Amino acid sequence: MKAVPDEAPGPVVGAGAEPDTEQTRGRLRPWHTLWFLLLLGWTVSAADRAVTGPVVSWMIDNGVGFLAEADNPHALGGLIGGLFFAGYMLTQFPGGYLGDRYGHRTLIVVSLLWAGVATILTGFLGGLIAFIVVRVVTGLGEGAFYSNDRTLITAATPERDRSLGMGVVITGLAFGITIAIVGTPHFIDVGKVFLPDVEAWRMAFWILGAATLLVGTATTWYFRAHLQWRTVCRATAHLGAYSLVSLVLIMAVYLIGDRSGLSDLWIALLEVVLAAGLVLFALTRKGEELGPVLRNRDLFLIYLANIAILWNLWFFSFWSVSIVAGAAHSSFASAALTAGFNAGAGILGFPAGGWLSDHGVRRGWSRKSIMLTFTGIQAVLTVAFAWYLSATDRPSLWVMGVLLFFASLFFNALQPVGHALTADLAPPELRGSAFGMQNLIGETGAVLSPAVGGVLRDSTGSWTAAVWLDAAIVAVGFCLLVGVRGRRPTPP
């Protein structure tokens, strides 16, 4: 059967369904099914990337694996997380560009199946270099999901519900991170039933990888009318070729830096320089074609502010278990449960932020003002968390949990607002490229935050300095957003 074009009206595209009227609102609509499917995609892919942090923390606490003999285990663990995000970062822009070329559903399917296979493979590898390589490969595949997911939601959802859709779907990120943080102790306990205790960490990757393959298979079936297998193969090969080059560059930076005696922090910084080189490459090779999303002042300020967003997201997602355990001197399982408040807040924050954004636009508010309000509240609460760690000898698990929850609530609420603002500002035909560039630049924060946090923890003996740094970076992000002029969409 001939495939339906990727953006043509069909069973999951709002443009092809009956008009959205007062009489039909509240019913299950075709784009609601799409939201649910993409939410599952976010859930499994976020769990795959977030599981590295609690597994690394467990390895450090139990003195096993390749972290057992490390002189600075938190710095090395943070670098491993940063290298994953180096891979994830380097396919953000190409993933969006290839989605604009081959179809956004096509790239979503490729990304999910790729991530599932790579996550399962992680559980079979034990050496440091092999572990890093397969984690980078996982990140390279997952990097193609974000820009295509955001673009497909924009195309499939009526404008009045656009931000709500983005918020509902990205709630999967909160589900996935929560599953990884809270579930890892239990996954490891399951592993102990079948494996020696020192190898039990592998089970976390096998369980989550299998879940990703299941969701990827379901997504493939659901999108089958829009997929053409020749196109899927070409897109996979194109993404694979780019990923191979990126993998070689990332590992070359790591190996040369390691053998030259550079610190883990310097290696992470060099990975960021590599990403900056990719941005310059895009400017020189695709400058005329992509000028509307590369040279737009407002979009570029949003790209830069996204560094602070992703720094905060992956600093806490990677190290929150260790932060809570170190501060309260609690068990791994108790710390994971408390840290889960930070991730779990997104289950409320993402859809609430999306709904408030759409509601505000209909009332004449600007998305920028809503995003600034949420960012400002998050900054104040993050400062309060840093102060509490500094002022208390033995912080309470409950107080930390409450502060983490409310800071994360507003933090997660601001993200779908920002995504909808990017969609408003970017030309429709280049939205995939715009979202890709936004996450490419923003992932600088994800690459650096685990590594910088780990270095500060090893050098100071506590997490306080790293949390204060996170609060300062959130404040800088707020200042960048002040400079965005934006445009106020006409209320539908």
Image (cartoon, rainbow, N blue to C red):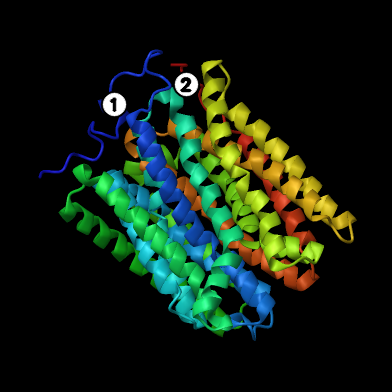
* Residue 243 visible in image: yes
| Percent x, y of residue 63 | 66, 82
Q: Secondary structure at mark 1?
A: helix
User: Residue 272, relative to residue 251: is it above or below?
Assistant: above
Picture layout, residue 162 above or below residue 205: above
Residue at 55% from the left image edge and 77% from the top image edge: 192
> Mark number for residue 15?
1
- Quadrant where the C terminus sits is top left
Closer to the camera, 469 or 404? 404
Distance Cα–Cα, label 1 vs label 2: 19 Å
| Residue at figure coordinates x 89%, y 55% from the top left | 391
Figure label count = 2
Q: Quadrant of residue 209?
A: bottom left
**x, y percent for residue 293:** 42, 39
Q: Are marks 1 and 2 in contact (CB under 8 Å)?
A: no
Nearer to us in this view, 12 or 81 = 12
Q: Looking at the picture, does residue 134 appear above or below residue 334?
A: below
Q: Residues within 10 Å of mark 2 (few under 14, many from 20)?
A: some
Residue 201 disc label:
none
Give residue 465's quadrant in the image. Answer: bottom right
Residue at image position (35%, 39%) is 152
On the picture, is 478 further left or further right than 396?
left
Query: Residue flagged by tag 1: what amino acid is it?
Result: Ala
Q: Do we see residue 98 in this rendering?
A: no
Q: Secondary structure at mark 2?
A: loop
Of the residues under marks 1 and 2, which one precedes in the sequence? 1
Instruction: Find residue 314 and report its horizontal and vertical position in percent.
Output: 59, 56
Residue type at mark 2?
Pro
Residue 451's spot in the image, x, y percent? 63, 66
Q: Quadrant of the N terminus?
A: top left
Q: Which residue is mark 2?
A: 489
